Image (cartoon, coloured by chain):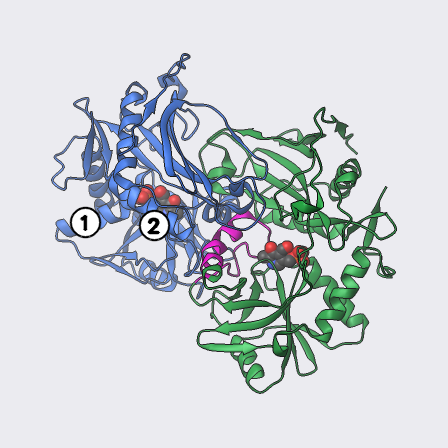
Chain colours: A blue, B green
Amino acid sequence: MQEIRVELTDHPKPKPTAADKLEFGTFFTDHMFVMNYDEGEGWHDARIVPFGPIELSPAAMCLHYGQSVFEGMKAYRAVDGRVLLFRPDKNMARLNSSNDRLCIPLIDEKFCEKAIEKLVSIEKDWIPSAEGTSLYIRPFIIGIDPHIGVHPARHLVFIILCCPVGAYYPEGLNPVKIYVEKNYVRAVRGGMGYTKTAGNYAASLKAQDEAEKQNYTQVLWLDGVERKYIEEVGTMNVFFVIGDEIVTPELQGSILPGITRMSSIELLKSWGMNVVERKISIDELAEAARNGRLKEAFGTGTAAVISPIGHLKWGDEIMDINNGEIGPISQRLYDTLTGIQWGKIKDTFGWTVEVK
Amino acid sequence: MQEIRVELTDHPKPKPTAADKLEFGTFFTDHMFVMNYDEGEGWHDARIVPFGPIELSPAAMCLHYGQSVFEGMKAYRAVDGRVLLFRPDKNMARLNSSNDRLCIPLIDEKFCEKAIEKLVSIEKDWIPSAEGTSLYIRPFIIGIDPHIGVHPARHLVFIILCCPVGAYYPEGLNPVKIYVEKNYVRAVRGGMGYTKTAGNYAASLKAQDEAEKQNYTQVLWLDGVERKYIEEVGTMNVFFVIGDEIVTPELQGSILPGITRMSSIELLKSWGMNVVERKISIDELAEAARNGRLKEAFGTGTAAVISPIGHLKWGDEIMDINNGEIGPISQRLYDTLTGIQWGKIKDTFGWTVEVK
Ligand SMILES: Cc1ncc(COP(=O)(O)O)c(C=O)c1O
Ligand SMILES: Cc1ncc(COP(=O)(O)O)c(C=O)c1O
């Protein structure tokens, strides 16, 4: 395995204080991990260096043609002071799945996990400890060839950033308002929907912007082919409790295989609940809402963990779900997942990895 | 209108020589145009400065979420020494259409045309004069907020680069080999296919890479919904001469509205030819090839102008078109378009703009 060279900063920044609220993605720690890929040499020169700007050719591949993938994960300060990661192996595996689709050379997953652990251990003091706070970790890879032409890059850089982030729900789990997007499509089978690549998020900006202007938190995407099957929400996968079935859209290439989704399915199964991955149309959902069988709806994702959906708008039809309150299954999943992540309850699944 | 500040380089680079072959997108001129957008201030600080690297936060919006649009156009050294642009207003209009879809603040099209003219006039000596060569112009806009979060940027930069480029067909117009892509999809209606944004090209890398490995130049994309209607080719729109009809896929939101496509349609119409924009399925095309009615096929785009397609592979079916030779309509379009662009024939359409 490669050595990781460490160059510590001479100018550590003051850590944000409680008053800073730790708005998501705004504060960065003192260091970042950097590693280069050059054709013929492979991934090399792994290093942890002071956080700072990067220099790119204005012709850099990623700026023009979007060869860019990323991951999103967190380090949690457990109640007993340990620092925990949640299923980092799954993030690295997904990064390689994105890499494959975007013609980016694969990374050594085990090595990159170690790199994350090393960076987090150096930035340990940046991990906030207030209830619900954590250190968000953003590994990403960009093609940087200083060359204009649609061709996989021969030179790339892998960077890991860390941001202390506040509690997603400082005032408790408030159900969100979502609307069903009818005009725009995020991704389609055969495309890049199952990857975490820049273009998928670029495609979502316009709908997201219109949703916010109408006072909705995010949009619920429908499939790009028939425009009727439910896909996912903004940066979350989605689950519905209909009668005694818990339904989540199956993975067909157009939605992100969320790690919170995967963990939620595993938890629900371990509780003996009837969770199914299948196609679910917006008509079926509206029908279930109309006849009172839609009991809960929630999103799953690293940022919010579990995000109950209290209000869903589909054209003129409004679905009010569980009186706009969090339901028992959403609550149990939230408590269990966050319990495991912050080391409050025993991790019988072996999901957490301690950073020494 | 804004002033454009000019700061000339102290270190002009040697110009590439004929021996350099001017590989596309590899050589850059001495200067670039730069202009910033900051929320509240609008587009400001337009300047022409020495070409050089740019500094970005590693958290910059464009690197993670792909908020990036671009254009591609050329300046031609006419046979009489004048410098000509080809329909630059159309490129600026398309840039604004991309901006709108990507939640990027609109530019002042007239002003940006002037900026291009000014930059090109400063870089005049970089425009090569050998047959078929030109100066490729790459305007692009990227969101640069140093903030991780899926949200339209509040800070952006607009840059224009120039590259002297060689003749696309140094050995004459050689028909290309294309294969019909069956697994991957580039874009779908409701998505961003009609824009020039980074993510569309990222989505195309994998198919393009596989095509090259099989010794094909580019892929022909089918629509993402029914997977049977012809869309476009790599970085070209596509036309087919079937019987006495010239068919090109209609614009439905998933393909780029090419300026060479638009100009070709206008030319064909001016010649009294029967050109139609409509849906055309791959089955219809294969059927036409089988019964000898497919006479010509060609791509249209700024880089190659007209690119005859001599060989088209769809699964096991091979369509050999016009014996792998350029056909009369392709040739006439090529001669006329390049004739107008290089000022060899009179521009009765008012398409060219002289750079003083
Ligand atoms: C598009 C999208 N879907 C779903 C998710 C949820 O995935 P995970 O649970 O791995 O965070 C995310 C974000 O993280 C996302 O960006
Ligand atoms: C995807 C795509 N289609 C078509 C074209 C042709 O457009 P134009 O004729 O404006 O160059 C281009 C490139 O320029 C392109 O990138």
In the image, ligand 2 is in what quadrant? bottom right
**Quadrant of the image occupied by residue B178:** bottom right
A131 left or right of B356 in image: left
**In the rendered image of this protein, does residue B159 appear above or below residue B133?**
above
Q: Which residue is mark 2?
A: A97
Q: Relative to B164, is A319 on the left or the right? A: left
Q: Residue at x 38, y 46 (%)?
A: A105
Q: Identify the element where label 2 is drawn.
A: helix
- Residue B133 is covered by the magenta coloring: no
Neighbour tally class for label 1: few under 14, some 14-19, many 20 plus, Cα within 10 Å? some
Magenta part of the chain: B184-210
- Residue B86, image x, y percentages: 77, 53
In the picture, measured across the screen, residue B114 lies left or right of residue B199, that is right
Q: Which residue is mark 1?
A: A266
Residue A329: percent from left, percent from top: 21, 47
Which mark lies nearer to you, 2 or 1?
2
Task: Please name the residue shown 67% across and 72% down the image.
Answer: B326
